[in-house]
Image (cartoon, helix red, strand yellow):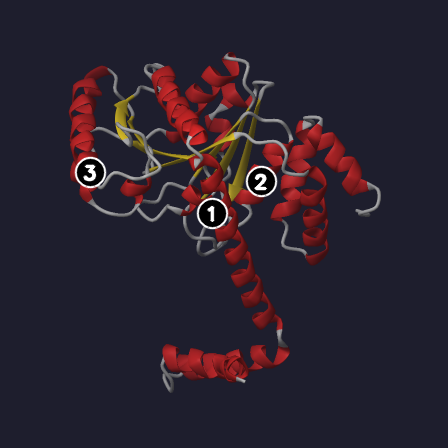
Amino acid sequence: MTRATDIPNLAERLRNGDRRALARAITLVESGRADHRADALALLEAVGTDRQATRIGLSGTPGVGKSTFIESFGLMLTGQGLRVAVLAVDPSSARSGGSILGDKTRMDHLARDPNAFIRPSPSQTQLGGVARRSREAVALCEAAGFDVVLIETVGVGQSETVVAQMADLFVLLLAPAGGDELQGVKRGIMEMADLILVNKADGTLKQQATRTCADYAGALRLLRKRPQDPDGFPKSLTVSALESDQIDTAWAEMQTLVNWRQENGIWAATRQAQADYWFTEDVRQGAVDLILQDPATAARIKTAQAAVTAGKMSPTAAAAQVLAPFQAKAKT
């Protein structure tokens, strides 16, 4: 790929809504190759930041029905004439590093919708429920003209709060009768949620879902009101992704919150704070990469690692020894 010709062309096709160009662009930003990284940065600059979508982060425990909800929710949105992009993060194996990336097969109706785009990505070694380049993928989807971008996390529990740093709304999907009714009083992912949706409110579970929703509503009232919320938020609702019931109500609540935040300056302030957060993260990760690429540092790491493995040095002392030269430079 030559930056002089391909990057401008790719950027133009992407801004014209070309889905293949978007897929290729996301592949480019996710690549770990140095030359691809340079092209990715050039592409991000070329597409600009003048277009904005409603970014919705979605998290929940495995088996709660995230894929079913996203498909039902996405089809409702495309039915209203909106263009929807879904960035689904799949967990990567700690042993092999591989990911199944089967989200499209679980959303087959939405995957065939011409107004929808689904992109599964591996989490790799990134913590927090998202992939390292998810934020850049969101920016590309916005540049491609999508109205709503859904960011689905891997679904591993209460530590998935990083998605809140790239979304305008954070939706937590929960199941009824899951034994988690009292989790609402805990700090962490619960206090990050803007909207809690108790899924599977159908059939024999409908009554239990209503009770679970009430339990969470009570738990949310115990949390201190956040300045970025109007009265009544955060709140909990029951939905049935299987029957597409109350999905439109959930969307109406999301729009109410988005509109209030835009009118009160919260939307813009949040995006500015998120930009600052990711600037700091990129600097920190870049510094780590530079340190690890230094030959002298790599040699010290190898020596210290051998000492740790042999039990001659504690991990903490070994790490301090590796970083000692950098600490000395910082003091001068």
| Up/down of 71 relative to 101, above or below | above
Question: Of 20 and 229, which appears nearest the observer?
Answer: 229
Q: Where does the C terminus fall, quadrant-wise?
A: bottom right
Pointer 3 residue: 180
| Up/down of 56 relative to 31, above or below | above
How many numbered callouts? 3
Tag in front: 3 or 1: 1
Provide the secondary structure element on which disc 2 rests: helix
Pointer 2 residue: 137
* Image-quadrant location for residue 169: top left
122 vs 311, left or right, is right
First in sequence: mark 3 vs mark 1: 3
Provide the secondary structure element on which disc 3 rests: loop
Question: Of 65 and 195, which appears nearest the observer?
Answer: 195
Tag in front: 2 or 3: 2
First in sequence: mark 2 vs mark 1: 2
Task: Give x and y (percent) for residue 41.
Answer: 68, 49
Residues at marks 2 and 1, CA–CA distance in whole angstroms = 19 Å
* Image-quadrant location for residue 153: top left
Residue at (54%, 18%) from the top-left corner? 82
Task: Give x and y (percent) for residue 309.
Answer: 41, 79
Residue at (59%, 38%) from the top-left corner? 139
Residues at marks 2 and 3, CA–CA distance in whole angstroms = 32 Å
Kindly identify which numbered label has been placed on residue 273: 1
Disc 1 marks a residue whose amino acid type is: Ala
Callouts 3 and 1 close, C-beta under 8 Å: no
| Up/down of 198 relative to 166, above or below | above
Q: Is residue 139 visible?
A: yes
Q: Can residue 177 be seen in this view?
A: no
Residues at marks 3 and 1, CA–CA distance in whole angstroms = 32 Å
